[in-house]
């Protein structure tokens, strides 16, 4: 455990102000791990990281303001207010009284000063002799000292580890209120995530969850969020308990609950609780902050399925009039909620788009990528907005941010490509091999790089910039899922089942001509391909040639006449190709049909709601008719 601690820097109150005195190289090191770190961009003042990682501070301040939390939540300790928070008696145990006096009387003192080494050693040796209140007071006093360069500094490391070990040892003997208050002291030291005490406290209180009052349950989830960990056996009990307590909560407390589940990567499986969260949020919408609304939207998105769409639709509609009172990331999270469940709400997309356009210079690259994802999901055609985004990405002030967050640039360029919008210089940056890092933390980057590579090859023949190297492209291709058409139908997706159903019908009617091919490696579902003799209207097997890395193009080019033959591709579109409960085609389905046509295929689109009557339709009528769709 100590080895883990030695790698972490200890940020404390006032750190943002004091960082300006540190050398630039050291500032960059601290920025990568600090809880208060600013976004690492070229222009920090114009594009700060929204919330500045201050969600935890916001939610803690919410609990500070509510009277129900007075017994377990302490305000931020400073030399001005900590005296009134201490419970030490006038003649407390030495050396703790001396530590208290030194902490309160010395301005900008350094705990690593040799003058304090003996005091630190004596506290560590006698920490097992003091009462719980004195342990709490030691933690409060420690949080008033200026931050040290790291947790490896000897005096701080010894003192903090001694307090952590002693609090952990006593945790199970304390009341829930004392356990939560001591955990709150560790929060003020900004070391909650690496304390042994916090994990022990979460395990201990998990056995009392069914009896804890509402404020204690909310605070328990706050500390689960800090730890990024939830006690597994307690999840079901916790959700049942929350369903009972939710009517007592204000919307900011609901935000703390959602933040706890989301940061622990735990979906809310209790659908009654999830519905209650959305309904209570809707009722209190005028009072919800940006940070709380963002946390609620993220957890609702993480927990919802197609069975929960009614409540999701209600919260999305209810939020539209309030968008301008929230920060941009909140609007984008609401957009992502709609996209994850393919709930097409053009008014919401338009409102978020307009709001972001007015403040695009202050939006992080990551947030721009999220918004473009939402627009590409529904195939929103807004060339003016895309031009505005491209100009912003080309701004020299974005250069350092693009270098640092290259994976976000790749996402932006790929989502623009889905809309058929290409910009050579941005593609050059995205596909520049010297900038690419196939990091496991960004798993989607492999697919997006491959998809962008192939899309540029197909739709931008005059592009002269770099493409992915053969080795890098093979690595990206290896991450794609191969389809086994011999699997039992119950193991196939709806897309695959419908495609196989259409294929069997065509093979019965036209013998062995139609067959399955994966024509585009960056679109997961294969298509049905066959060749038609224009004169005799007979069907035969297609003649295909393979271009770079599995892109298959017809030897007979339908768009150039193709002589006596046309090569047809039947694209079966399942429900996932459409927005929920509508016939609005998604952006990726449109892009696939567009790219197949660009390669020379005559594309026939067969939506899922037409498959049942497919046997009544002569496919050749679609081939030789005015349109190439059964819709």
Image (cartoon, helix red, strand yellow):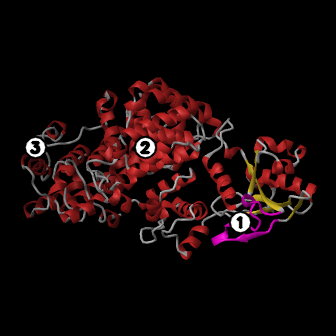
- Mark 1 element type: strand
Instruction: Give yes or no for contact between labels 3 and 2 (Cβ–Cβ under 8 Å).
Output: no
- How far from the left and from the top, in percent, is residue 307? 65, 37
- How far from the left and from the top, in percent, is residue 212? 44, 35
Instruction: Give yes or no for contact between labels 3 and 1 (Cβ–Cβ under 8 Å).
Output: no
Q: Earlier in the sequence, mark 3 or mark 1?
A: 3
Q: Quadrant of the N terminus?
A: bottom left
Q: Earlier in the sequence, mark 1 or mark 2?
A: 2
**Residue under circle 1?**
553
**Residue under circle 2?**
205
Question: Which quarter of the figure has residue 9?
Answer: bottom left
Q: How many marks?
A: 3
Q: Earlier in the sequence, mark 3 or mark 2?
A: 3
Q: What residue is rendered at 31% in x and 37% in y?
A: 72
Instruction: Give yes or no for contact between labels 1 and 2 (Cβ–Cβ under 8 Å).
Output: no
Does the rendering let one see residue 243? Answer: no
Q: As rendered, which of 592 and 218 lies closer to the eye? A: 592
- Mark sitting on residue 91: 3
Of circles 3 and 2, which is in front? 2
Up/down of 362 relative to 464, above or below: above
Up/down of 276 relative to 95, above or below: above
Q: Determine crowd level at label 3: few under 14, some 14-19, many 20+ residues with C-alpha closer than 10 A.
A: few
Bounds of the magenta span? 542-563
Q: Is residue 558 magenta?
A: yes
Q: Determine crowd level at label 2: few under 14, some 14-19, many 20+ residues with C-alpha closer than 10 A.
A: many
- How far from the left and from the top, in percent, is residue 444? 53, 59
Judged from this view, the residue extending furthest toward the bottom is 471
Measured in 3D between alpha carbons, the distance from the residue under mark 1 to the one under mark 2, in whole angstroms, is: 62 Å
Q: Quadrant of the C terminus?
A: top right
Q: Determine crowd level at label 1: few under 14, some 14-19, many 20+ residues with C-alpha closer than 10 A.
A: many
- Mark 3 element type: loop
């Amino acid at each position: 455990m100590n080895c883990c601690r030695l790698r972490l820097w200890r940020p404390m109150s006032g750190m943002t102000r004091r960082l300006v005195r540190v050398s630039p190289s050291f500032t960059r090191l601290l920025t990568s791990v600090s809880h208060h770190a600013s976004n690492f961009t070229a222009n920090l003042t114009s594009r700060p990281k929204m919330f500045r990682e201050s969600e935890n501070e916001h939610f803690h301040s919410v609990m500070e303001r509510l009277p129900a939390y007075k017994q377990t939540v302490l305000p931020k300790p400073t030399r001005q207010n900590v005296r009134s928070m201490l419970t030490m008696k006038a003649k407390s145990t030495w050396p703790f009284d001396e530590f208290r006096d030194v902490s309160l009387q010395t301005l900008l003192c350094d705990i690593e000063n040799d003058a304090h080494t003996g005091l630190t050693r004596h506290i560590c040796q006698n920490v097992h002799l003091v009462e719980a209140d004195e342990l709490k007071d030691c933690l409060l006093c420690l949080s008033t000292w200026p931050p040290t360069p790291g947790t490896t500094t000897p005096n701080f490391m010894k003192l903090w580890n001694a307090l952590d070990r002693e609090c952990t040892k006593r945790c199970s003997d304390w009341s829930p209120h004392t356990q939560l208050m001591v955990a709150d002291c560790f929060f003020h030291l900004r070391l909650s995530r690496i304390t042994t005490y916090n994990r022990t406290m979460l395990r201990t209180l998990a056995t009392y969850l069914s009896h804890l009052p509402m404020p204690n349950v909310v605070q328990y989830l706050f500390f689960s969020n800090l730890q990024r960990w939830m006690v597994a056996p307690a999840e079901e009990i916790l959700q049942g308990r929350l369903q009972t307590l939710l009517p007592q909560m204000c919307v900011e407390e609901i935000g703390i609950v959602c933040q706890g589940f989301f940061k622990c990567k735990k979906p809310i499986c209790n659908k009654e609780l999830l519905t209650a969260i959305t309904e209570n949020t809707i009722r209190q919408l005028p009072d919800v902050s940006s940070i709380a609304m963002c946390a609620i939207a993220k957890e609702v998105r993480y927990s919802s399925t197609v069975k929960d769409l009614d409540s999701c639709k209600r919260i999305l509609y209810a939020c539209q009039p309030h968008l301008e009172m929230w920060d941009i990331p909140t609007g984008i999270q609401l957009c992502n909620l709609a996209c994850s469940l393919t709930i097409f709400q053009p008014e919401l997309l338009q409102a978020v788009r307009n709001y972001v356009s007015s403040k695009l210079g202050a939006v992080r690259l990551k947030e721009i990528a999220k918004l473009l994802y939402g627009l590409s999901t529904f195939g929103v055609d807004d060339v003016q907005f895309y031009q505005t985004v491209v100009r912003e990405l080309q701004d020299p002030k974005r250069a350092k941010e693009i270098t640092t967050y290259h994976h976000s640039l790749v996402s932006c360029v790929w989502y623009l490509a889905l809309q058929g919008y290409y910009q050579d210089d941005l593609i050059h940056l995205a596909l520049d091999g010297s900038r690419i890092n196939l990091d496991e933390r960004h798993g989607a980057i492999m697919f997006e790089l491959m998809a962008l590579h192939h899309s540029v090859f197909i739709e931008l023949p005059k592009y002269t910039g770099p493409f992915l190297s053969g080795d890098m492209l093979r690595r990206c291709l290896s991450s794609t899922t191969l389809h086994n058409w011999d699997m039992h139908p119950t193991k196939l997706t709806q897309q695959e089942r419908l495609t196989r159903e259409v294929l069997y019908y065509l093979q019965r009617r036209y013998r062995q001509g139609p067959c399955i091919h994966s024509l585009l490696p960056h679109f997961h579902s294969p298509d049905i391909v066959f060749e038609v003799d224009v004169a005799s209207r007979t069907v035969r097997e297609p003649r295909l040639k393979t271009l770079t890395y599995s892109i298959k193009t017809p030897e007979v080019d339908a768009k150039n006449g193709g002589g006596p033959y046309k090569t047809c591709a039947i694209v079966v579109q399942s429900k996932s190709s459409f927005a929920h409960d509508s016939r609005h085609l998604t952006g990726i389905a449109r892009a696939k049909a567009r790219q197949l046509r660009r390669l020379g295929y005559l594309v026939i689109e067969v939506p899922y709601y037409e498959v049942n009557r497919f046997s009544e339709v002569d496919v050749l009528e679609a081939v030789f008719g005015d349109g190439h769709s059964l819709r």
